């Protein structure tokens, strides 16, 4: 963590805020364990079924009970985090996550385990949204690329290394160790956060309307996830997808959804969200098809398959820090586009292989795609969250995480459908082609500039303010001494829970006060504006 604090300077000088890299490390650690839990338990399901004397279908809920609340609660959690203290939320979420890990490891029967995993999923949803917010608020604007690359790289690495870590623990220590392994990391993160994070606002409970919004979003997203997940084996479950539309539409058209869509419109982040979804779907589809083909059709052992697929996370881990540095030096968008292009190239090179794969054939192509994902992850998050309204940072973080989670879910489902429709002998090629198309579609989406980047800020006379204009946000820093530069520095120096200089509760009570709200609309529980 930098020791540089707030110094004095000439009149009008905005002091440099200190970069808190220890908090960025906390964001990376907790992103890793939260994503690790998405997949690490899969490998232990058979052992859980035998140990607790339950069916395989019941044991599967040890995974689903965590995954469903994590994804279903992302949007409500994002709205909630925009109005509470960041330090308090992190300590409660990380502490609850750790406690639930211990309870799951000690489970004497299945109902106990499932209940612990449900609660852990709720705490995990808070970590998913809060970690990128913590990273971006812990550094100056010109260091955002490097900061965002930490959780953006370590999070997906946790997801893809989960089965390998789980397998080692299962073989040597038993299934309960799968839940215990995360506790030391969480305790270390808690200790650092307790000492390094500045005090801020308190937590507040959800009001009645916020709870109703949470129920609507959770219901719609849960139906969508369940139908897509179960469609891998039974495509008829896809008929359930339309049932997710009414609750989500009702929420979007209500006072709870309008601030979310308003924040996305204000930052012009819709195309970038599509790119995130496309790249996540491409990775998930490729991983599903490759693992299935290597083991079932090519006769690879589970160990050989795992080592071959490990090329992707290795490439991603090496390139992640590089992507952050490139974003800070040349701009977030060029780095993100370059990464998406490399990912698309790596997946396109898999398609002509057909069925005659060797480990080396697939490994170097996966490594290329992994390098692309590493270069893309941090810059994309810095790009989207850096252009979000300051009081909506957590909301935009939640939509970005939801896009990624839906991509991970949709990818295998679409690959399965493509495999089935292609007929005998063409399933592998069809599934990989689908993954490549999804990655290629992400390139133009991430290249599109958002509204916040193309509309220059204006000064008092209506002329563009110095240091603003197209591409300014991409660079992450402004000309020193300009009003835009001073605003960036002041924003970075604010406490995490008071991004706009007014108490969160006061902002919530001001109708139409949030960026992106339509004229005449009210936000949260605010009454209609009076003449």
Image: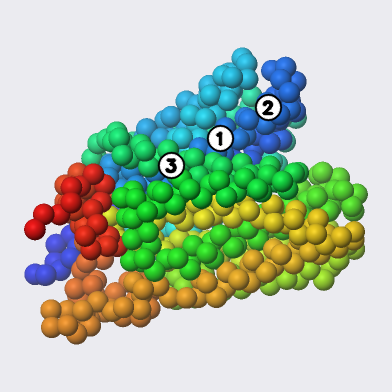
Q: Secondary structure at mark 1?
A: helix
Residue sitting farthest toward the top:
108
In terms of image quadrants, where is residue 286? bottom right
Q: Please give left or right for residue 291 compared with residue 469 in the image.
A: right
Q: Position of residue 195 (x, y in %)?
A: 32, 38
Residue visible at 87% across and 48% down? Answer: 296
In terms of image quadrants, where is residue 67? top right
Q: Please give left or right for residue 505 compared with residue 80 in the image.
A: left
- What crowding class fits label 3: few (fewer than 14 Cα within 10 Å), some (14-19), or many (20 or more)? many
Q: Position of residue 353 (x, y in %)?
A: 84, 68
Q: Secondary structure at mark 3?
A: helix
Residue topped by disc 3: 216
Q: Nearer the viewer, residue 153 or 57?
A: 57
Tell me the distance, in whole angstroms, between the alpha carbons under discs 1 and 3: 19 Å
Query: Which mark's residue is nearer the viewer, 3 or 2?
Result: 3
Marks 1 & 3, CB-CB < 8 Å contact: no
Residue topped by disc 2: 59
Does residue 459 lie above or below 518 as drawn?
below
Of the residues under marks 1 and 3, which one precedes in the sequence? 1
Residue topped by disc 1: 66
């Amino acid at each position: 963590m930098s020791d540089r604090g707030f110094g004095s300077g000439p009149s009008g000088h905005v002091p440099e805020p200190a970069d808190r890299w220890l908090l960025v490390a906390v964001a990376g650690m907790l992103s890793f364990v939260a994503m690790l839990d998405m997949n690490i338990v899969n490998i232990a399901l058979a052992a859980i079924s035998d140990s607790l004397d339950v069916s395989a279908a019941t044991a599967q809920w040890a995974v689903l009970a965590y995954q469903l609340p994590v994804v279903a609660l992302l949007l409500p959690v994002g709205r909630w985090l925009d109005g509470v203290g960041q330090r308090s939320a992190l300590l409660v979420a990380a502490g609850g996550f750790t406690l639930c890990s211990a309870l799951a490891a000690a489970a004497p029967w299945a109902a106990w385990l499932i209940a612990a995993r449900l609660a852990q999923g709720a705490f995990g949803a808070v970590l998913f949204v809060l970690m990128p917010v913590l990273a971006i608020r812990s550094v100056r604007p010109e260091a955002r690329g490097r900061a965002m690359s930490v959780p953006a790289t370590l999070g997906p690495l946790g997801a893809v290394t989960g089965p390998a870590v789980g397998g080692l623990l299962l073989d040597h220590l038993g299934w309960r160790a799968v839940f215990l392994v995360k506790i030391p990391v969480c305790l270390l993160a808690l200790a650092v956060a307790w000492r390094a994070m500045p005090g801020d606002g308190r937590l507040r409970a959800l009001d009645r309307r916020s709870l109703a919004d949470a129920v609507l979003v959770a219901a719609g997203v849960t139906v969508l996830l369940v139908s897509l997940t179960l469609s891998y084996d039974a495509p008829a479950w896809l008929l359930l997808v339309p049932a997710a539309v009414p609750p989500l539409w009702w929420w979007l058209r209500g006072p709870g959804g309008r601030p979310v869509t308003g924040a996305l419109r204000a930052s012009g982040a819709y195309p970038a969200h599509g790119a995130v979804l496309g790249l996540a779907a491409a990775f998930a589809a490729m991983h599903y098809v490759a693992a299935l083909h290597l083991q079932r059709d090519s006769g690879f052992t589970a160990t050989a398959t795992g080592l071959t697929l490990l090329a992707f996370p290795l490439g991603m881990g090496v390139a992640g820090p590089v992507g952050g540095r490139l974003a800070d030096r040349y701009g977030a968008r060029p780095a993100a586009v370059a990464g998406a292009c490399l990912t698309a190239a790596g997946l396109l090179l898999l398609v002509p292989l057909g069925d005659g794969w060797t480990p080396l054939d697939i490994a170097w192509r996966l490594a290329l795609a992994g390098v692309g994902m590493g270069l893309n992850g941090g810059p994309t998050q810095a790009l989207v969250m850096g252009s979000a309204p300051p009081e909506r940072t957590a909301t935009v973080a939640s939509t970005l995480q939801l896009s990624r989670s839906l991509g991970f879910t949709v990818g295998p489902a679409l690959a399965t459908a493509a495999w089935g429709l292609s007929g005998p002998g063409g399933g592998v090629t069809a599934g990989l082609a689908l993954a490549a198309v999804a990655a290629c579609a992400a390139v133009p989406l991430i290249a599109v500039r958002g509204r916040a980047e193309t509309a220059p800020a204006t000064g008092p006379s209506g002329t563009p303010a110095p240091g603003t204009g197209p591409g300014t946000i991409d660079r992450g820093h402004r000309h020193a001494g300009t009003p835009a530069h001073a605003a960036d520095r002041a924003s970075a120096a604010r406490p995490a829970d008071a991004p706009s200089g007014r108490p969160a509760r006061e902002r919530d009570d001001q109708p139409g006060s949030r960026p992106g709200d339509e004229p005449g609309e009210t936000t949260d529980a605010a009454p209609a504006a009076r003449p």
